[in-house]
Structures are given as C-alpha cells and as structure tokens.
Amino acid sequence: MGWTLGIDLACRAAHVASLAGPDGALVWSGRTFFTRPDDLERLWADVGVDAGELTVVMEPTRNAWAPVAAWFDRRGVKVVLVPTTQSADLRAYYSKHTKNDRLDSTLLARLPLLHPEGLRAHTGHGPADPLRRAAKQRSSIVKRRTAVFARIDALLELLGPGWYQELGTDYGNAAMHLLARYADPNDLIRLGPARLSRFLIRYSHGQWREPKAAALLQAARQSLALWDTDGMDFAALSADIAVEAEQALQLSEQLDTLKVRLTQLYVQADPDQIVRTAPGVGPILAATITGRLGDPHRFTSLAAVRSYSGLVPKVSQSGQAEHHGGITKAGDRTLRQAAFMAADMARRCDPQLAAKYVRLMNAGRHHDSAVCHIATVLLTRIAACLRTGQPYVIRDLDGTALTEAQGRRIVTEQHQVDPKIRAMNASTRKSQRLKYRTSRVSQKSLSASTSRPVTNQPTSRHVA
C-alpha cells in the first residue's frame, strides 16, 4: 500500500488536500491550493514522494477535476476518481455529524484502506476530450430544438389544423423560413401564389412547389374564417412564431456544424471505424458512442460496460427472494440514448438481435423494454469489438456471417412479431393501468363522496 493524496475539489474556492501514509496515518491535512501551476508545484514539493508510490484520489467535481488530473498524470502519478455517491456513503459512516472540506480530503486520503476494491485508475481526458464534449453538446441542442418544435406546434394550433398538416411535424428548412417571415395569414395571402411558390422552391430545394403553395394559402384563408377580425391579433401571433422559428433555424445551423466536427473527431478517435461497422450505427451515433464510452480498456469487464450504460435492471436480493426492477439509469445518459436508438435499428437487420427482440415481445415485454435489452447486447458487442480491434460481424442464429442486406431479408422473413401479440400486450398493460387507477380512488376529504365504502368512522368534525 503506497502513499495517498486525497483532494477535495472546489469549482471556485480553494481545493483542500490531505496526505496519508501506507498505514493510513495522516502525514498532514488541510493544505489549500488552487488549480494554478505554482500552487500545484508547491503541493508536489510538500508531498515529497516518488510518483510511482503515490495515488491521488478525488471526486469528479464538475469539470474542475480534469486539469488537476492531467497535471498529476503527466508526472506519472496514478489518479483515481471516486463516484460522489460512494464517497458520500463512506463519509456518512466515517463521521455522522460533520461535513467539511478537511474531513472530505482526509476521507479520500484514507479511502484505499476503507474501500480498496472501489479504486479504479483514471484513463483518458474526460471533459477535455473534444469528441466527448461535442457528442454531449449535440444531444443538448437536439433537446432544445425539440422543445422549440413543441412550442411551435402549440402556436400553430391557434391558426387551425391546416397549417401543421401542410408543414408536417419535422419542420424542415422551408417550413422554418416560412414561419419566420409569413406566419400571419394576411401576409401569406398578400404574398400570392406565384411569389409563395418561388419562396418554397428556393428554401425546399424544389421539393415544395405550386401545389404546396395552394394548400398553404387555403390554410391561411381557413385561419381568417375561424377568427373574427377582433378575435385574434395575427400580427402578434406571427411575431411569437417568428421568434421560435428563428431559434429553430439557428439551432439547426449549429447541428449542421457539429455534424461535420463529430465526423472529423470520430475518424481521429476510431481510425478503423469499428463502431461504424455495427448495425444501426450511422456516422452521428458512431461518434456519440465512441465519445461517451471512452477508452473501452478502462473497464474491468464487459459487465462493467453494461453497468456504465445504465441499461441493466435494478436487482434487490435477500435470501432466496430476488426482485428485478427497471433499468438503473446510473450511467452516461447520452450513451444510453445513442445505444437505444442504434438498437432499434439494429434489430431490423441482425437476426440474432431480432430473435431476442421477438422472444421478449412474445413474453409480454413492452417495446421500449425489449429495445433496452437489445441495446445492452449491442453495446456489449461494440465494446468487445473495440477491445479486440475487430469489426462487428452480423451473423445468423447458426453463426453464419451475413451482409446487412442478407440479415435484413432474414429478419423480414423469419423474425417478425405477430401483430396480435403486440395488440394483446397493449391490451394487458392498459387493463393493468386501469386496475391500478381504480384501486387508488382519491378522496380529498373524509366527508367527500367516493365510489367505495369508507372504512373509517366519521367524527363530529366531519359531520356537516
């Protein structure tokens, strides 16, 4: 057991460090420093231990840990990141009534003695990895744009169903430009069919032409017929829609830029494009999985990969009793979402995954639950391919290698869920939900009427 330097990191305040010897005895504690080269050099001089004998233990506090870990890593020091939940539980055990920075650094310094099996050496650059950041950033922008689309849906409902029927729900480039400039039905009618057709042809690259212009003009006339002249301020509504549409256009431009960046960064991170060979994994999903998974060799086993994804079920065991709940969701959310989307596509062309999906659906699983199982298998296989440096190979149930086209044909012919099974599962779940709701009748007051007999006896306070 070597020397341990426990560091309690802070985002804006000073960090606190404590040094423990091989026997767990504190050499010193409570040294404060900032993430500055001079402060780190002084801390290194105070430690006075060879790099090979020292282990630095700290929590991944936001992104403040990354430069500190990189500084010690350059000097050959082993850096260990402890999950915050794990250190919190140990802190509660170590001191029941106290929580301060000195105690936190002391706890981290003595962690090798308290919980040695929980120490895993840190590898990679974490948030300093540009691919990891770009994948997270794209996921955040997609969610923001989806929220904008939902607000546009709500505003278009005021104009009538003709608008969102003609513009669709995906809101492409032409739809957003139209709403940014001509969401007022009066403005759209004044534009006329000829100019509106040229506008649509320009921004839709020829996909929308005269028929679409005529349909939109008809929707505008219906909006005017639905409202009286004083019933709706179309100019104000148009301004609100324009704000949302301009946000959506800006977010779409950022996504296009990020797509190029992600493609370039993925090629650098995975030169052989092993992740890309997996079924259902396109360029964006390949970059997201590679960036958020990180170095696959840092996991002690493939089971650790599954646990990191958060797609494994919760397990509660006591004696001979064992209960499996929903997925833990304890890992990387962006990785989990990417694996789920890839699995939903992979089951359509990989016979092994398709057969497992059919078995789960025939057993009464929900579609999302079945896809989560498939996502766990797919992510495990991708990690195994990355660890061995071999591409993903689609195989039939007997192990025969297949092309994607062959696998898709076999899945279509042999591994399809009976529509009656889907309908029966949906009906069963609906019955269970209705049974659960009716068994929990809400009674806001003891004197309120209810659909079942009241078990308690009313008192004088409850009698009118």
Image: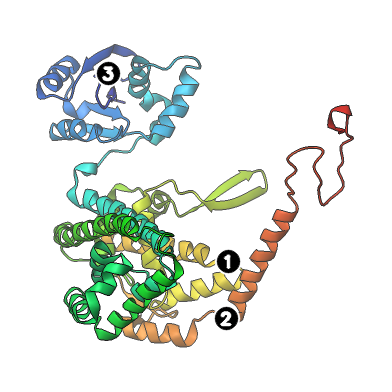
How many residues crowd mark 3 within 10 Å: few (<14), some (14–19), many (20+)? many
Identify the residue at image location x=33%, y=38%.
Answer: 120
Relative vertical location of residue 182 with respect to residue 258 in this rendering, above or below: below
Relative vertical location of residue 59 with respect to residue 292 in this rendering, above or below: above
Q: Which mark is residue 419?
A: 2
Q: Nearer the viewer, residue 123 or 312?
A: 312
Q: Nearer the viewer, residue 350 or 239?
A: 239
Relative vertical location of residue 128 with respect to residue 9 in this rendering, above or below: below
What is the number of callouts on the image? 3
Residue underneath mark 3: 16
User: Quick one: SS at disc 1?
Assistant: loop
How many residues crowd mark 2 within 10 Å: few (<14), some (14–19), many (20+)? few
Figure coloring: rainbow
Residue underneath mark 1: 365
Question: What residue occupies the far front of the structure in this picture?
Answer: 229
Identify the residue at image location x=66%, y=59%.
Answer: 433
Q: Nearer the viewer, residue 255 or 327?
A: 255
Cα separation between marks 3 and 1: 50 Å
Residue 375, given in percent of the width and then of the height, sits at 42, 63
**Amino acid tagged 1:** Arg
Q: Quadrant of residue 153?
A: bottom left
How many residues crowd mark 1 within 10 Å: few (<14), some (14–19), many (20+)? some
* Numbered disc in front, either 3 or 2: 2
Identify the residue at image location x=35%, y=86%.
Answer: 406
* Numbered disc in front, either 1 or 2: 2
Q: Quadrant of residue 285?
A: bottom left
Residue 342, given in percent of the width and then of the height, sits at 36, 66
Residue 204, given in percent of the width and then of the height, sits at 21, 76
Identify the residue at image location x=28%, y=17%.
Answer: 18
